[in-house]
Amino acid sequence: MAHSLKSIQNIAFVLVVIRLCCALVGMVSLPSVWAQNSNAGDTNTSLPAVVVTGKAGAPGQETALIGGISEASVATTPLSISVIRAENLRQAGAGNLSNVLRADSSSTDFYNTIGFIESAQIRGFLLDNSLNFRRDGLPTSNYAPLVLENKESIEILKGLSGVQAGTSTPGGLINYTIKRPTNTALREIFAGISERGTTLLSTDLGGRFGDAVFGYRLNAALENRRPMADQAPGKRSFLSAAFDVRLPADSLLETEFELSNTQQISVPGFGLLDKNADGTAETLPAPINPRVNLNNQPWSLPFESRSRVISLGFKQTLSNAWRYSLQASNQKIRTNDRLAFPDGCGNGPSYVYPGFCGNGDADVYDYRSENERRSLQALQAKLQGNISTAWVKHELGLSFTQTRYAERFEPNQAYNYVGYTNIYAPLVLPADPIPRDKNTLRDSHTKEIALTDVMRFGEKWSLWLGARHTQLNRSSIRTDGSRGVAYSQRFTTPWAAIAYVPWQGGYVYVSAGSGVESEVVPNRPDQFANYGEVLPALRSHQQEIGFKQVLDDAGLFSATFFNISKPFFADTLPGSDQNIRLAGGREARHRGLELGWRSNILPSLNLQAQIMFLDARITKSLDMTELGRRARNVPAYNASLATSWAVPGMQGLTWTNRLALTGKKAVNSDNSIQLAASTQWDSYIHWRQQLPTLGLTWRAGIDNVLDRRYWKDAPTQYWGGSYLFPAQPRTFRVSVQMRF
């Protein structure tokens, strides 16, 4: 299979080169046309910048690939799905995953700091960066910074994703859909600047040539970064191209590639303070100036990420009822992870870990992990069709997915103590970059078969059934050849739903499903008595009840109740110094209610309101003090209200406001320390100006208008400690977008 994927990769690369040349030649003769349809990337002026919009424009008409094997309507699917257009995120100044998550109330940050890889929580559960992300439906690694320039939309599946993804955490699934060739000529240049001096220049070109047989889409970007934090400069370059060929017999050949290069000084988190000097950090510090960067040593080097993705796809319609598709992708990520890392404090009466001393002193480590290499090859085949048996109509889907994921590192990494600093008055420290700590190499190979059947009983009732069977093979070994572990597991993840249409535009459903996670006890005999043991796979369960109503003006109201139970792998400390890792030693139950309303309440006023109430509790634990406590870093509620107003008497001018509200978050396991509830107001305007041969869109925005200072995030780490990240300060930005 490896040889076949390599062959596909080589063929795709040749096709890319050939079609890029053809596209560039064809562009010379194509007329300049002001694109008016969604395929040309036009935005919907009636919607606010952060409003969830669908591929078809109106909320009640949007579709998504992420829900199952075939593309489905969000309004009539027994799943909770948001579709966020990247073009609308641009209007709000979004440039990373954290900004994307703000458009959906069920999604929250997790360790989303400047200059590093971003993560996400959905329904309070952390997503796995190597398992819970998709790219046009194919598995993708999220260990590279998100690039929005070539993304058409971001689809968020909320809840258990076992039938869609097999092995994955139960929070949800995020799918990035790629911009494809446009039917009409598209010429776009974007230029933007923020108050701190961040500049962005990007271009988007698309069209067809050769009697519309060949299509192309080219995206490129250059960014010079000057973020909110001091001494954290960076730069980014990006290039992507997508091509297709319309072949006879209702078939389509597609290929695309993406190259991204990012360099930026990363900004570490802060920690709790040991005010009592007893060795336990128990005090939440007052919100610190968000411009402070603790990674500010003369020897601090940027975090570097270079990523490449290349894919090839083929689709064909066999008849009015049947169609199939083939997809293959190859992704490579190379990173240099460097950081002056504050962690613990040995400069006080008692050693503090995790956290900092009460006066703000913190130990600093010179951390360097050079030349980290991650690769992911994916192959997927799908068959979809419709059949009728008696009085039941069946919509069948069958898919086969194969993935190979590998992590390769240098023999050693550096994690060396170099002294202590103070978060209020940083000190200059010496460097110690010598790598001394061994690394671990990892491999994962999966084969998955999924089957779905949507049975429709007349116009009112439908029964949805699905199951995915996964064969998982994993191995790991230290770079010195020691502590090797290899294992294989098989499991099936079922899902079922029943749906009813009570009236025109209404949709009610009940669903239940399961998901699995797998783990081996870390191969460290100094810490684990059962090191290297293959633990039984953990199975999560979800029950969900939902209601959706398409409104007369093409808006959408939704209400979803969910209950998710997730077991964890937990460590216990016996009479010795070694832990024993157990499967299912800890369990959490996340029970919540999601409400959403999107509609044009007036001809010139669009509103989006959404809220998630979440009761996330620990229901099982080896630590009895945790029982019944709230899960850490999970808000009790998360809400947003966005309005977009077409200003009367000023054609093309739209004013958008967004209010985000987040409830308290527990920082520690006994909930004695909590982040306060927060409110943030963002405001943007954009003005569309149509000249005889040029279309202009002027934008201006203010993030955090009131300049509120608060701790926005307290991500928990695997060793039990928590980081603290401040909210972005008030930030101004302007941009212009030209289409010709």
Image: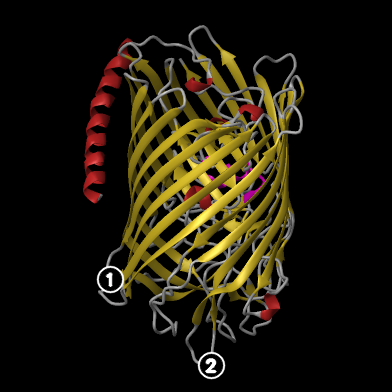
Crowd tier of the residue under label 2, counting other residues whose Cα lies within 10 Å: few below 14, some 14–19, many 20 or above: few
The x, y position of residue 77, in whole percent, is 62, 38
Q: Earlier in the sequence, mark 1 or mark 2?
A: 1
The Cα atoms of the two marked residues, 1 and 2, are separated by 31 Å
Q: Secondary structure at mark 2?
A: loop
Q: Is residue 108 above or below residue 551?
A: below
Residue ID for mark 2: 575
Q: Secondary structure at mark 1?
A: loop
Q: Which mark is residue 479?
A: 1
Q: Which residues are magenta?
A: 95-107
Quick check: can you spot residue 620?
Answer: yes
Residue 399 falls left or right of residue 276: left
Quick check: can you spot residue 608?
Answer: no
Q: Quadrant of residue 15?
A: top left
Q: Amino acid at mark 1?
A: Thr
Q: Is residue 553 above or below residue 129?
A: above
Q: Residue at x 63, y 56 (%)?
A: 542
